[in-house]
Structure formats: C-alpha cells, structure tokens
Image (cartoon, rainbow, N blue to C red):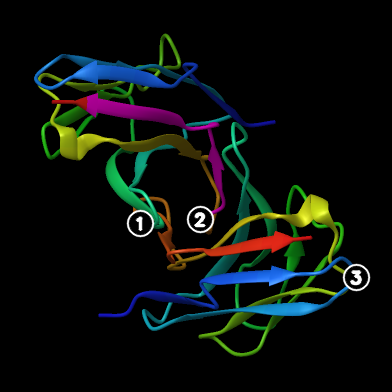
Amino acid sequence: NAGVTQTPKFQVLKTGQSMTLQCAQDMNHNSMYWYRQDPGMGLRLIYYSASEGTTDKGEVPNGYNVSRLNKREFSLRLESAAPSQTSVYFCASSPPTARNQPQHFGDGTRLSIL
Amino acid sequence: GNSVTQMEGPVTLSEEAFLTINCTYTATGYPSLFWYVQYPGEGLQLLLKATKADDKGSNKGFEATYRKETTSFHLEKGSVQVSDSAVYFCALLAGGTSYGKLTFGQGTILTVHP
C-alpha cells in the first residue's frame, strides 16, 4: 500500500544547481499536484496536472517546471536552484471525482539550497 | 477568489484539555471542507471532512461542523492527548471543481504536554 511515493527525502543543493524531484502514485488517480510548504504559509500550489498529458501553473510556479511522464508519475524540476526555493515539497494525487475524495499526500522532500 | 483563514498558533495545551482551532473560509458556491493533520516528518493525512452545510465530520475524537451562515469549520476535541501534537490544516474544495485542487489555511501547530 505505497500510495504516493516521493524521492529523494532530503537534498542539499548549491545555488545554481539543478535537480528533479520524483513523485509516483499507485492509486490510478487522474490528478497530481506539487506543493511547497513554508513556515506560517501553509501549502502553496506550484503546478498541477488534472489528467495525463496536461499541466497547469498554480500559485507559485516561477523557477519550476513539471513533467507528467505518465499516469503514475509527475516530476518537478528546479533548473537553477535559488536559496528562496529552500522548502519542503509535497506531491499529492486525487481521483477524477474529487469532491468527496480529497488529495493523498507523499511524505515530502526536504530541500535546502545553500 | 477562495481563501481559508486559521487561528494564529502555536497552541499549547495540557493533556485532557479541550481543543478548538478556528477556521473560516471565503468561497463561491458550495465548497467541501476538510481538516488535514501533519505529524512530524510526515505528509498530510485527511482527518475529517464535510461536504454540505450542517454536516458534521468526525474522526479520532475530533469534530467539525460546516456552518454556512458563519462560513466556519472549527475543529474541536474534548480531551487531547500527547499523541495529538501535530500541525492542523483547514482546507476547502470549491464547488463545481471537477478535480481536487484544494485551498489551504496556513496551519496551526498544536503541542500537548503530559
């Protein structure tokens, strides 16, 4: 019963480096999401994918790109990391009729940019 | 737009004390409302939900009632335990949304002492 799996769990980068955060879900959900969590600000949506083959910007997309590789996988890429991107990143997924079935979350990736 | 406002934290209580965490929202239409809980080092887990006015969601001794007239969804528990120490997030899913894009409050840190 894996649910939503994120890798890596921890990462330290230097300013300007690039990296990709991986997310996979095994619940056959159509929609997937990337959030960042910062102290006192709750979760802010970076990008989402309503269904396979589509992606859309959320509240804070600048500095990020995403790829919906297939129905299971949704990756988040930082092309040139900045200290302001130090955060905890969460991936989530939800089924197509989500009104009564909210999102399922991974355990997060803790990312530090030096 | 949609928004969720939670009471300022952190909240510190003694074991067996009564808990209230206030949550108010702004949304068009008829949103569904949720409380998520995040234990240290983990992702968010759904705690309870309510999908229409006057519904009461409940789970693990926690309760919240969907009050349309006051646009509120306050979380309560009669007797907290040390194991309830976590961050609590109120969230809404706007009415008519065909997939699960949630709007979160900023989170409230709860610490329960023995």
Classify the position of the N terminus of chain A by image quarter. Answer: bottom left
Query: Which element is circle 3 on?
Result: loop
Residue under disc 1 on the same chain as residue under disc 2? no
> Where A58 sits versus B32, above or below?
below
According to the picture, the residue beneath numbered tag 2 turns out to be B100
Give amino acid for label 2: Gly
According to the picture, the residue beneath numbered tag 3 turns out to be A16
Q: Nearer the viewer, mark 1 or mark 3?
A: 3
Residues rendered magenta in the picture: B101-112
Which of the marked residues, 1 or 3, is nearer the chain's N terminus? Answer: 3
The residue lying at 36 percent from left, 43 percent from top is B36
Give amino acid for label 3: Gly
Residue under disc 1 on the same chain as residue under disc 3? yes
Give the letter of the chain under mark 1.
A
Residue A78: percent from left, percent from top: 80, 71
According to the picture, the residue beneath numbered tag 1 turns out to be A101
The residue lying at 82 percent from left, 78 percent from top is A18
Q: Is residue A7 visible?
A: yes
Classify the position of the C terminus of chain A by image quarter. Answer: bottom right
Are dots 1 and 3 in contact, CB under 8 Å? Answer: no
